[in-house]
């Protein structure tokens, strides 16, 4: 199992160089010119192409049981679709139902994910609190390689974490050296606004964005950031979608807080006019939370990504087909929330980012792969073309046009939020663990070939956090 990629331009987050890459047994073994490789090595001529670290999508929900149904994309189809779009790893979410033990949920998700064709890892959601949750968090960090815990500040009466849970869980994260992450929307306000819309007789998808306006996200972002500040712990905000949230992150960063942000390809590109589509099914297909925002927020997000206020890009890939969305035909609050994109993200980011001069090719690699690997502590195993790194690569043809469409995509969903958009720049070949798994539009994958990737706690960051808290913080920890 050895592979030589010759003649391409290697693009890392820090620099681009002309060099060949030799991969053996799933790892990058050598980088350079005139490499001494076995005569039976498979050779790919990448002249004129870019060779980049495979994308890492830090936010997917494969086969998620949610809002009375189950997301249609499973781990097999979802990781396959990712590979077709140049994404070689996902970080999915284990979401225990209220009162469900974290370890039980984690084991269920691991079983589901064992069908993955590409590498994967898990954030685990803390949706409720008691001593057993605290103990399971320790087991997950110390034995299972989970270094991040997710908190939904929305979805009242379901998976919403109350402030008490946030405080307890963030404090526990500090003891364990793990990163808290938040879905920042004020769930009480969302619930209140939803009821107001329904009482006014507004039941269609157009009510969805009105019940979750940007201030709802701004408030929750600020609250989570301030809780993290009081506890003295870093924080990662998922799917930052609006200027109000960006402003909170920027302020906190300027005051020295370690706050990280993620934005979605969809939020960068689409605005809330999609909810006004007269066709109910099309409007409902865009129902996801946080919703697509009024015009203007997209450019603010791009600037935040360009300037480093947010560092990663994701998709929140969570597929529901038309028959599932129809569950909310008479009541928008019952439309399963979610849109797709694991296959589309890199192409959209390249087309709107690199082709428009918003991102350099190196910045593209940073925001689609390297920054996620660094923030979630799997760098340089992932996110880099370096000797010893996993041979997860995408060979990119920056001249190749591709039309994004539900008719041709590999995602298991009957809709594409980027339908009909022709992008310039797309994957020619995707390599996972040193194997060619996608070439010229065709997948060649093996069910179960994906590996669970452990992500260790953060010794260097948390040593610094501990010293800082001792010196300046109200919050001290015994570990
Ligand atoms: N938002 C969605 O749109 N779907 C899944 C969960 C979430 O927070
Ligand atoms: Zn979310
Ligand atoms: Zn999500």
Image (cartoon, helix red, strand yellow):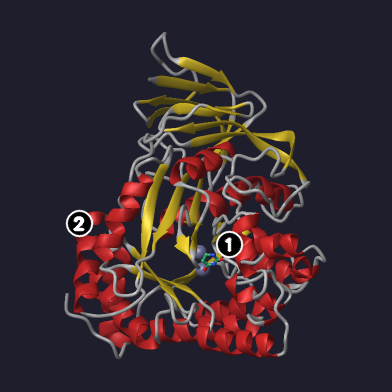
**In this rendering, does residue 6 appear at all?**
yes
| Number of the front mark, 2 or 1 | 1
| Along the line of sight, the residue nearer the viewer: 25 or 267 | 267
Q: At 57% across and 77% down in the image, what residue appears?
A: 250
In the orientation shown, which residue stands out farthest toward the right?
A: 278
Q: Residues within 10 Å of mark 1 (few under 14, many from 20)?
A: many
Reply above or below: 403 against 326: above
Residue position marked by numbered label 2 in the rendering? 143
Tell whether 363 sits left or right of 58.
Answer: right
Assign the N terminus to one quadrant of the image. Answer: top left
Reply above or below: 191 against 141: below
Residue contact at pointers 2 and 1, CB within 8 angstroms: no
Q: Report the Cα–Cα distance between label 2 and label 1.
A: 32 Å
Residue 157 percent location from the top left of the image = 44, 81
Q: At 50% across and 52% down in the image, what residue appears?
A: 57
Q: Residues within 10 Å of mark 2 (few under 14, many from 20)?
A: few
Q: Is mark 1 within 8 Å of ligand 1?
A: yes
Q: At 50% across and 68% down in the image, what residue appears?
A: 67
Find numbered disc 1 in the image and state the secondary structure of the residue it sits on. Answer: loop
Residue position marked by numbered label 1 in the rendering? 338
Q: At 34% across and 67% down in the image, what residue appears?
A: 96
Reply above or below: 247 against 420: below
Residue 168 percent location from the top left of the image = 29, 82
How many numbered discs sit on the rendered protein? 2
| Along the line of sight, the residue nearer the viewer: 416 or 454 | 416
Q: Tag 1 or tag 2, which sits nearer the N-term?
A: 2
**In this rendering, does residue 19 appear at all?**
no
Find numbered disc 2 in the image and state the secondary structure of the residue it sits on. Answer: helix
């Amino acid at each position: 199992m050895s592979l030589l990629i010759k003649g391409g331009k290697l693009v890392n987050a820090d620099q681009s160089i002309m060099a060949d890459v030799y991969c053996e047994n799933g790892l990058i073994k050598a980088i350079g010119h005139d490499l001494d490789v076995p005569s039976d090595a498979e050779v790919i001529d990448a002249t004129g192409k870019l060779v980049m670290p495979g994308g890492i999508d830090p936010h997917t929900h494969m086969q998620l049981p949610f809002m009375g149904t189950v997301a249609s994309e499973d781990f097999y189809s979802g990781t396959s679709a990712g590979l077709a779009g140049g994404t070689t790893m996902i970080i999915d979410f284990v979401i225990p139902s209220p009162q469900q033990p974290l370890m039980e949920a984690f084991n269920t998700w691991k079983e589901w994910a064992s069908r993955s064709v590409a590498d994967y890892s898990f954030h685990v959601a803390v949706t409720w609190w008691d001593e057993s949750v605290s103990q399971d968090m320790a087991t997950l960090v110390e034995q299972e390689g989970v270094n991040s815990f997710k908190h939904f500040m929305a979805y009242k009466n379901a998976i919403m974490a109350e402030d008490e849970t946030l405080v307890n869980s963030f404090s526990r994260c500090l003891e364990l050296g793990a990163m808290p992450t938040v879905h920042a929307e004020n769930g009480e306000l969302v619930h209140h606004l939803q009821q107001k819309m329904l009482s006014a007789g507004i039941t269609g998808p157009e009510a969805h964005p009105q019940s979750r306006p940007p201030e709802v996200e701004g408030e929750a972002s600020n609250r989570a950031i301030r809780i993290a500040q009081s506890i003295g712990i870093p924080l990662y905000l998922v799917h930052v979608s609006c200027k109000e949230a960006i402003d909170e992150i920027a302020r906190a960063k300027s005051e020295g807080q370690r706050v990280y942000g993620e934005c979605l390809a969809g939020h960068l590109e689409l605005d809330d006019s999609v909810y006004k589509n007269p066709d109910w099914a099309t409007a409902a297909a865009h129902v996801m939370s946080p919703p697509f925002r009024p015009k203007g927020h997209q450019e603010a997000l791009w600037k935040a990504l360009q300037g480093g206020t947010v560092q990663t890009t994701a998709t929140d890939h969570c597929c529901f087909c038309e028959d599932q969305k129809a569950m909310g035909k008479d009541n928008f609050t019952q439309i399963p929330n979610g849109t797709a994109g694991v296959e589309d993200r890199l192409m959209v980011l390249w087309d709107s980012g690199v082709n428009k001069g918003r991102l350099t090719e190196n910045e593209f690699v940073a925001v689609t792969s390297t920054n996620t690997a660094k923030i979630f502590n799997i760098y340089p195993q992932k996110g880099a073309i370096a000797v010893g790194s996993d041979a997860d690569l995408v060979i990119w043809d920056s001249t190749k046009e591709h039309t994004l469409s539900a008719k041709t995509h590999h995602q298991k969903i009957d809709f594409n939020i980027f339908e009909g958009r022709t992008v310039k720049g797309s994957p020619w070949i995707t390599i996972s663990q040193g194997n060619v798994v996608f070439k010229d539009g065709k997948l060649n994958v093996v069910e179960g070939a994906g590996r669970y990737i452990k992500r260790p706690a953060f010794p260097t960051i948390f040593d610094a956090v501990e010293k800082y808290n001792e010196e300046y913080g109200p919050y001290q920890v015994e570990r």
